[in-house]
Amino acid sequence: MPTTAAHLATPPASPDVIECVEPATLAPLGRVPVDGPDAVRDAVARARVAQARWGASSFETRRALCAHVMAHLLDHADELARIVVRDSGKTLDNALMGEIWPVCEKLRWTIAHGEKHLAPERMSSGLFLHKRATVLYQPLGVIGVICPWNYPLQNVLGPTIPALFAGNAVVVKVSEQVAWSAARFQRILDEAFDALGYPRDTVRIVNGFGATGAALVRSGVDKVVFTGSVENGRRILEGSVEHLTPVVLELGGKDAFIVCEDAHLEQAVHAALAGVFISAGQSCMAAERVLVHERLYDEFVARVTDHASAMRIGAALEAPADVGAIVSDEQLALIERLVSDAVSRGARALCGGRADRARGRFYEPTVLVGVTPDMPIANEELFGPVMVVMRVRDDDEAIALANRTRFGLGSTVMSRSPARARKIAEALRVGSCTINDFGFTYMAQDLPFGGVDASGFGRLNGREGLRACTNVKAILEDRFPLHMPAKIYPSDPKTYPLVRGALRLLYQPSLSGKAKAALELARALRS
């Protein structure tokens, strides 16, 4: 799940170490050494050696690896959730539901269905009845993963699991904003490989700033999976040109949350609260624009404002909190800028609307109304705990507003009419849509996940995400060894009329056309 944080950004004055700080308390966590370009290239080289063995492993072995990782997550869930909270600033509930749960579900799905989607697949051989057609899904080699800060554990393991199950090795560059937790997450994989007797170099996590990410892109890896901002996605594409490295880009979002007048109000209110305030809004799938039909608008706004006004912010490990911290000063300043700009243009904050830096990096849960489509906050990715509510007259206006931005990642439609909800969902230019719930398309692991337009290209999750980690190879081989040479040379003047007659016989749609073609072919054969 991407973020607008510049995890390929210019490093600070001391580029050799990363100074790690808790966003919720500003307490220091420690210093993490930076892996420079040479260290990145070494990690890739070691991964390539390890992959030669891992790529030959059985699906049974790969399922066993997934089972080891699953057991570790379940046995250490409390510890891992607390680590995520300290490094990212989110709440304990959000860490458990947004990090541990999605990874466990991905592991469960991969164990149950991974082999089915990667096993050799028999296909039709078309006209060549004497041949057998097969598609193989073979490992690419080494996959580079560059991930953001907003889901420290899930963003590491999410793309790594399908890459490993497909037989690849992986080198992961984590965001410098959450470098402190990387060593603990590396241990999960190290212990799994140790248990199975495979080299730890099969997966390596590297830390650093822009130079580290750029080095990974240019290291000769066989594919790059990048999750992050549009601007950094462009940098990834520029770097990938050097070796013609294929990429999957999962970029930003400005997801619309559409509430029809026939929606179940309480269901819509709580789905919207989840869509906006989970992880303090720092999610690519956050409901960044809530488009409410005018008949339901006033009551909806009153309900969400009551709930948002009662939400508690704070360090989740010190006291109960509903909304956690913002990961960086830069992100907090961005939220402030967009909200202040909207208010200066006529929008109103019914609650919240201010940063709280007294204890850490916090932004008050906010409900913003009076937002117009031309305001920057209606078009730029916000990544904060701000519910932007916009009034719409009908479904057509909701669809037009939803499709107005350059992004096209996810969406939500709330309506009691299945036909109406489906019609709206199909009209949205996005990669996914959840009807009458928020965000569940990401948890339904059979479904692919990704976006269109500025939200990127390529897919994670499901069969498509698993096969994206492979070389899809076509094989056409003998079914019956006829050994009849197809003679083209030397050129024969009879070849052209024979082929022309055969083409017309095969592809003419009408019976009369086929009859004429058969006569033409017969004349060509007689000649």
Image: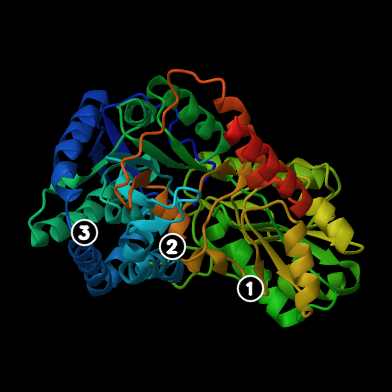
1 vs 2, front mark: 1
Residue that protrudes farthest toward the front in the picture: 526
Residue, disc 3: 188
Label at residue 118: none
- Residue 213 locus on image (x, y percent): 36, 31
* Residue appearing at x 30%, y 69% in the figure: 111
Residue that lies at the very extreme toward the left in this rendered image = 197
User: Residue 438: horizontal and vertical position, in percent?
Assistant: 61, 69
Q: Amino acid at mark 1?
A: Asp
Up the image or down, 296 lies above or below 471; here it is below
Looking at the image, is 82 positioned above or below residue 222? below
Q: Is residue 231 above or below residue 466?
A: above
**Is the Cβ of the residue at disc 1 closer than 8 Å to that at disc 2?**
no
Q: Residue at x 23, y 34 (%)?
A: 44
**Residue 390 visible in the snapshot:** yes
Binning the other alpha carbons within 10 Å of mark 1 as few (below 14), some (14 to 19) or many (20 upward) gives some
Name above or below for residue 363 compared with residue 217. below
Q: Quadrant of residue 112?
A: bottom left
Residue under label 2: 315
